[in-house]
Image (tube, rainbow, N blue to C red):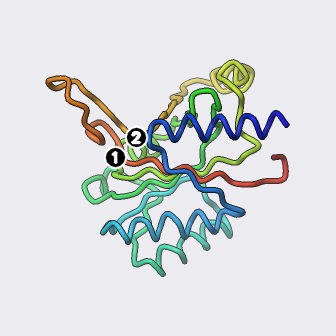
C-alpha cells in the first residue's frame, strides 16, 4: 500500500511542475516513446546512456524507425544538434516529484543539461518516499569519489532576468518521466 501512496504522491508533485508522466510495461516502450517524441518535435539526434546488449539493439531499431540518429558517447561533438536525452533514473523521490541520477559521466551530465527534451525511465522499485530514504544508497555512492549526483525536479526554469519565468534556458524545456513497472514494484 505504501508503494501506491508514494506513486500517487510522486505523480502529483511531478505534475505540479509540468512533468509529463506515462506508465510503461517495458523498456522497448521507452525507446519508442523517446524516438517518436524526438521525430514529432522535429529533432534529429537523441542521446542515450546506460542501455547495453539487447536493449541497445532495440533502442537503435526504435531510432531507425523514427529517423532519429542515436548518440551514445562523445557528446561534445553532438552538443549543437542534440534534441532528446533518454536516461535511466537511479531513484525517484515521491514527496518532491524529483529524479536522482548518478551523473558522474560527463556525457550523461551534458545530455541532461543540453537536450531540449529529457525523457527519464524510472523503475517503480526505485521510487522512495523522501530523500531521507535514500541516505544509505547515497552514502554508498559517495564512498567512491569522484561522484556527481543530480536531483531533477521538472523542466529547467529560471526567473533571473527581470524576474520573468522562462522555461528551458538552463536545461531541458520538457521533462518526461516514464514509470517502468518491474518485478520489485
Question: Residue 166 or 135: which is nearer the viewer?
Answer: 166
- Residue 18 horizontal/vertical position (percent): 44, 43
The furthest residue to the bottom:
65
Question: Residue 112 or 37: which is nearer the viewer?
Answer: 37
Residue drawn at (60%, 67%) of the image: 56
| Spatial separation of the CA atoms under disc 1 and disc 2 | 5 Å
Question: Residue 24 or 72: which is nearer the viewer?
Answer: 24
Q: Which residue corresponds to mark 1? A: 173
- Residue 55 horizontal/vertical position (percent): 65, 66
For the residues bearing labels 1 and 2, Cβ distance under 8 angstroms: yes
Give the quadrant of the N terminus. Answer: top right
- Residue 127 horizontal/vertical position (percent): 70, 37
Residue 131 sits in quarter: top right
- In the rendered structure, the answer to whether residue 13 lies left or right of residue 76 reads right
Residue 155's disc is: 2
At numbered mark 2, what does the secondary structure look like: helix, strand or loop?
loop
Amino acid at each position: 500500500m505504501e508503494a501506491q501512496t508514494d506513486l500517487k504522491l510522486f505523480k502529483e508533485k511531478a505534475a505540479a511542475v509540468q512533468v509529463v508522466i506515462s506508465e510503461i510495461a517495458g523498456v522497448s516502450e521507452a525507446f519508442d516513446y523517446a524516438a517518436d517524441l524526438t521525430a514529432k518535435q522535429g529533432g534529429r539526434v537523441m542521446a542515450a546512456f546506460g542501455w547495453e546488449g539487447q536493449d541497445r539493439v532495440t533502442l537503435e531499431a526504435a531510432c531507425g524507425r523514427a529517423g532519429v540518429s542515436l548518440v551514445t558517447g562523445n557528446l561534445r561533438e553532438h552538443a549543437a544538434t542534440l534534441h532528446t536525452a533518454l536516461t535511466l533514473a537511479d531513484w525517484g523521490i515521491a514527496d518532491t516529484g524529483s529524479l536522482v541520477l548518478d551523473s558522474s559521466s560527463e556525457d550523461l551530465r551534458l545530455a541532461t543539461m543540453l537536450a531540449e527534451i529529457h525523457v527519464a525511465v524510472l523503475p517503480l522499485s526505485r521510487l522512495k518516499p523522501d530523500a531521507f530514504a535514500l541516505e544509505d544508497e547515497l552514502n554508498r555512492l559517495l564512498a567512491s569519489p569522484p561522484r556527481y549526483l543530480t536531483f531533477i525536479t521538472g523542466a529547467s526554469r529560471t526567473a533571473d532576468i527581470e524576474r520573468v519565468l522562462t522555461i528551458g534556458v538552463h536545461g531541458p524545456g520538457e521533462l518526461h518521466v516514464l514509470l517502468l513497472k518491474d518485478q520489485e514494484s
